[in-house]
Amino acid sequence: MTDRVFDRCRSMLKWLRTLIRSKKFAVAEMLSDPPVFLAQEVGSTIGEDGLHHPTVVIDVSNNPEVADLPRVHAIDGIGDVSTAAIRTGDAVVLGVQLTRPVTAAFAVVFDLTMHEQFLNEVADANSLTFATTSPSEASTNEPLWLSVDIDGERLREALANSIEPDEL
C-alpha cells in the first residue's frame, strides 16, 4: 500500500467516526482513537464447511486488546458486531465495533487499486475473516482469526461512492 493511500486513510478516521455515529451505533464514543491496521495480505480460508471465506491478514502484535479478540470469540462467541465502510479516492476503511461479550473497535485500511476484487468477494459472502497470525507463522503456530458478518449491500455502496471530507 502506498504511503499516500495510508496517509489519506488515517485522515479518514474522523469521517469514519462521523459515519458510525450517524448510524447510532451503541458505543460510538469509544471510537475516538481505534487502532488502525493495514490489509497486509488477502485471500480465503477453507472453513470446516468446506467453503472459501474471504480473509485479510492484519498485524495486531502492537495491540493486545485486538490480538485477544480471536480467543474471546472462540470461548464466548462473536457477540454483537457492527461494521461500516467508507471510501475516499483509492482508500477504503472498514470499521469493526464489538459490543458484547467485550467492547472493542478497530479499523482496517484497504487500497482499492489492489483489493477491489477481494472487497467485492467480501460483499458477496457477507462476511470477513481477520487473520491475526501471519501466513508464514500459521504452519508452526495455531492460527488465530476473527470472523464477522458484513453488510454486503452497504459495503458495495461504499465501494461505489467515494466520499470527500466536505460531504459528511
Image (cartoon, helix red, strand yellow):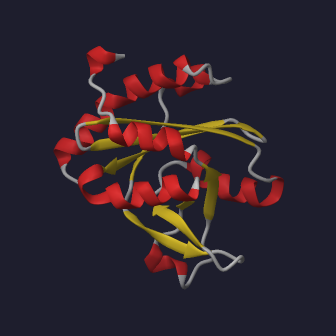
Left or right: where 73 falls relative to 1? right
Q: In this view, does 100 lie above or below 14?
A: below
Left or right: where 77 falls relative to 32? right
Q: Which residue is drawn at 38% across and 56% down?
A: 39
Residue with the most extreme right position: 76
Q: Residue at x 24, y 44 (%)?
A: 90
Q: Is residue 117 above or below residue 21?
A: below
Q: What number of labels is visible?
A: 0
Name the spot of residue 64 as percent of width and height, x first: 58, 50
Question: In the image shown, does 11 or 18 lie closer to the viewer?
Answer: 18
- Is any atom of residue 91 visible in this view? yes
Name the spot of residue 97 as percent of width and height, x first: 60, 37
Q: Quadrant of residue 105?
A: top right
Q: Is residue 81 above or below residue 53?
A: above
Q: Residue at x 41, y 65 (%)?
A: 42
Name the spot of residue 163 as percent of width and height, x first: 30, 27
- Is any atom of residue 128 visible in this view? no
**In which quadrant will I find the C terminus?**
top left
Question: In the image shown, does 153 or 39 lie closer to the viewer?
Answer: 153
Name the spot of residue 150 as percent of width and height, x first: 58, 47
Q: Is residue 20 above or below residue 47?
A: above
Question: In the image shown, does 36 or 158 lie closer to the viewer?
Answer: 158
Left or right: where 131 falls relative to 162? right
**In which quadrant will I find the N terminus?**
bottom left
